[in-house]
Amino acid sequence: MRMHHSKLVLLLVIFFCTDVKAQSDNYAREIVKQLSSEEFKGRGYVENGDKIAANFIRTEFEKLGLKPFSNTYFQKFYITVNTFPSEIELIVNGQKLQAGYEFLVTPGSPSISGKFETVYLSIEDILSDEQLGQKLSTSVGKYLIIESITGYELEEADFDRFDEVVRFLKYHPNNPAIGTIELTNEKLTWNGSQIQHPKSSFTVIENSVEFPITSVGVNLKSALESKYKTQNVVGYIEGNNSDSLIVIMAHYDHFGKMGNALFPGANDNASGAAMMLSLAKHYSKNKPDYNIAFIAFGAEELGLLGSKYFVENPLFDLSKIKFLLNFDLAGTGDEGIQIVNGSVYRNKFDLLTSINNEKELLPQVKIRGKACNSDHCFFDEAGVPGFYIYTLGGIRAYHDVYDKYETLPFTEFEDYFTLIVEFLEKI
């Protein structure tokens, strides 16, 4: 049967669009799989994880034909970071706990080794000056065990008091105890630290230990790297109009390893790096209207250090940036995407929303105001317009050992990618 010409064209268009979307999804999955694999050491500062990841991204830039702004894709800078390069042992009542799954070490903890007696602090102890003082007077050379506050119904002032006391116990040199263990019933969430505290401390899942806790064995070695050299990775694609510049960026770093515990960072932020590289791949084959710079930032998780350094030492004129897009947590999207600075650049937000509605792509495009919560922050302060975008809904894995490639759903990645390409063509 002969097919009508218009129907044939329509089918070819549908096939082409579907094929492009599938290719972007497959490429992104492979990028996330690589970046979050054990080989990349969690993209942190143990076993050169950050450098392994940066070299991988540089190689992708080269494959895609991106040009460096100088003679290298790397922009080097120095950071200070507290690391845990060897296995961490925490033994409670003779039971060895599993790092990352049953306990976390506080990121700024110093080295400590030995077996210690304990002093138990209840919520009531912490809220009473008298009871707290009595307990602390018996805690010299011992570990404090802090009762979990999960599920307690307290007045706001009591919560504030609890937080203040716990911060003192964890971080202040005047705490007479040798260290602390805070019990919790909530998800373990880790961070990094640029400093080392006087006391070691841990967070432990309450149901992983038996009560009463009478003894704690610790073998913890930390290393404060005071001048660690890391890097941003920067390249660009030439467009038809060289007067203005679009910037696509995402941080590639994560928390690396806490002893033997690996923090893969599949969603945070291998997925954002995959979105950036997917766009680089697209524009390497489809010449854009404007020059497009692609920046993979280091040390975001330590306090936006890579982007801060870049804005203070730019490789191109920041005033030429027409618009920037900062991608983070791009691997879900069950509830759409959040647009930080959406209310600041309302015309651009309305354009993005209208495209999404017309194409019926994502469940929602949610507006948000200004927020200094990722690498766009210092560009904001320099007067550069742009959005910080992250997906909403889906898995809860975040800053933990469960943020893995195998469980990342990529729920709306294809439609998200399509929306961004359409948006960049119209701004």
Image: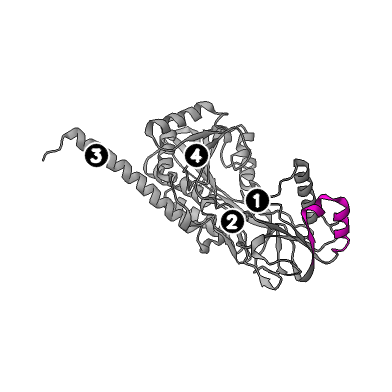
Measured from the top left, where is residue 175 in percent x and y? 84, 57
Q: Which residue is mark 4?
A: 337
Q: Mark 4: give few (<14), some (14-19) or many (20+) Cα within 10 Å.
A: many
- Closer to us: mark 3 or mark 2? 2
In the rendered structure, which segment of residues is drawn in magenta?
Answer: 118-139
What is the spatial separation of the Cα atoms under label 3 and label 2, in whole angstroms? 44 Å
Q: Position of residue 157 (x, y in %)?
A: 78, 42
Task: Say if mark 1 contacts mark 2, CB within 8 Å.
Answer: no
- Label 2 secondary element: loop
Check disc 3 and report the residue beneath it.
Answer: 11
116 and 341: which one is in front?
116
Q: Residue at x 48, y 48 (%)?
A: 331
Among numbered discs 1 and 2, the one appearing first in the sequence: 1
Q: CA distance from mark 1 to mark 4?
A: 24 Å
Q: Nearer the viewer, mark 3 or mark 4?
A: 4
Q: Quadrant of residue 290?
A: top left
Check disc 1 and give the amino acid type: Leu
Which residue corresponds to mark 1? 302
Where is 162 relative to 139, above or below? Answer: above
Q: Is residue 190 magenta?
A: no
Q: Earlier in the sequence, mark 3 or mark 4?
A: 3
Mark 2 / mark 4, whichever is N-terminal: 4
Tell me the residue that label 2 is attached to.
400
Q: Earlier in the sequence, mark 1 or mark 4?
A: 1
In the image, residue 165 lies at what x, y percent?
Answer: 80, 51
